[in-house]
Amino acid sequence: MSCPSVKLNNGVEMPILGLGTWKSKPNEVTNAVETAVKEKGYRHIDCAWAYGNEKEVGEGIRRSGVPRSEIFITSKLWSMHHQCVEEALDETLANLGTDYLDLYLIHWPVPLNPNGNHPRIPTLPDGSRDVLFDWKIKDTWSQMETVLKKGKVRAIGVSNVSKRILETDILPYATVVPAVNQLEIHLYNPQHNLVNYLKSKGIVPQAYSPLGSVNSPLLSDETASEIAKKHGLQTPDVLLGYLVAKDIVTLPKSVTPARIASNYNGALAAASNLAKEDIEKLDGVAASGKQRRLIMQQWSVDLGFENWPGQTP
Ligand SMILES: NC(=O)c1ccc[n+]([C@@H]2O[C@H](COP(=O)([O-])OP(=O)(O)OC[C@H]3O[C@@H](n4cnc5c(N)ncnc54)[C@H](OP(=O)(O)O)[C@@H]3O)[C@@H](O)[C@H]2O)c1
């Protein structure tokens, strides 16, 4: 089954399903990527420098034998690299063994001290994150625009960015509007307001942790399970297909071949089988008392998200 794609605001096409690679161990991810691309139909891989496995992902892509030009590859600028975007991108390109990315995202709108006490998450003596409060995200974004102009990436975007940060720190200064905002979006954290806002700006929402990540409570959700049963599908199919049906680019991670296959086929089957009333029911699950973020990062900064414990909307 070929995967539908969505068109980014610069005309680039992106497959609506992609394979996630966070927490995929280096010794597992090469096989996972090779299998996904060679045998299961995936043409979109979501990576990040911070996942520490880009070299092995690149190896999986090469082993698949599918031409580079047919695969959509995303990677992300880590928070310690906001001041040196091109250098960080060059390292990612070398890791992956490619000379361009299809999409490069700012991983978090929180610049961290590149000379701090840790190679990925530097902290201060009180345990809070070592944030570069003086650095402006607009200056990171302008470097993202430079690598786009140089042709090293086909599109640029952001991740974990709220409406407030987009409107105050990025859009007023941007020459290029971000093509994508990758966010925690799933049944228990649907972010309806932010998703609708992004769509109104022509920014494509991407859903990370669409299955609820590791040890997910979503897999036993009653509403999703009932709807799955009604259609002869599995619960993960409904969790993924629900997002695809709403034109949200969806990035399930698995290193298990059977799940890699069933996530792809099941998501597309569910997206075409779910009725309007199913989507409406699923849309209401979080608001019925199940609203919950599953990936909490304590950044020591107010990111401006709704439903972020300890922060105002
Ligand atoms: N931008 C960001 O800040 C950010 C943050 C988080 C994630 N992401 C991206 O989004 C991707 C997906 O998010 P995620 O990895 O947090 O979580 P996820 O895709 O929601 O869930 C992955 C977990 O579910 C398991 N799983 C996969 N398919 C399954 C199935 N059909 N039935 C039961 N269990 C299943 C996987 O196990 P196995 O692998 O063992 O099969 C793994 O433990 C990441 O890998 C990453 O690429 C981005």
Image (cartoon, grey):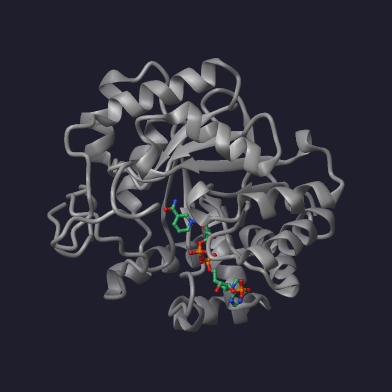
Tell me which residue sits at (54%, 55%) in the image: 52
Q: Is 212 in front, or is 56?
A: 56
The residue under the point 31% across, 24% down is 139
Vertical placement of residue 41 versus 85, above or below? below
On the image, the x and y values in percent for residue 239 come to: 53, 68
Does the rendering let one see residue 252? yes
Number of disc labels:
0
**In the foreground, 62 or 164:** 62
Image coordinates of residue 204 in percent, x first then y, are 48, 39
Q: Residue at x 34, y 53 (%)?
A: 192
Instruction: Name the residue nearer the viewer: 279 or 147.
Output: 147
- Give the quarter of the image for residue 78: top left
Where 157 sits versus 54, above or below? above
Please name whichever residue, 117 or 12, is drawn nearer the observer in this view of the structure.
117
Q: Identify whether 82 is placed above or below 194.
A: above
Q: Quadrant of the N terminus?
A: bottom right
Q: Is residue 198 above or below residue 299?
A: above
Q: Is residue 275 visible?
A: no
> Residue 288 appears at what percent x and percent y?
29, 73
Residue found at x 45% / y 21%:
145
Q: Does residue 203 appear to the left or right of 139 in the view shown?
A: right
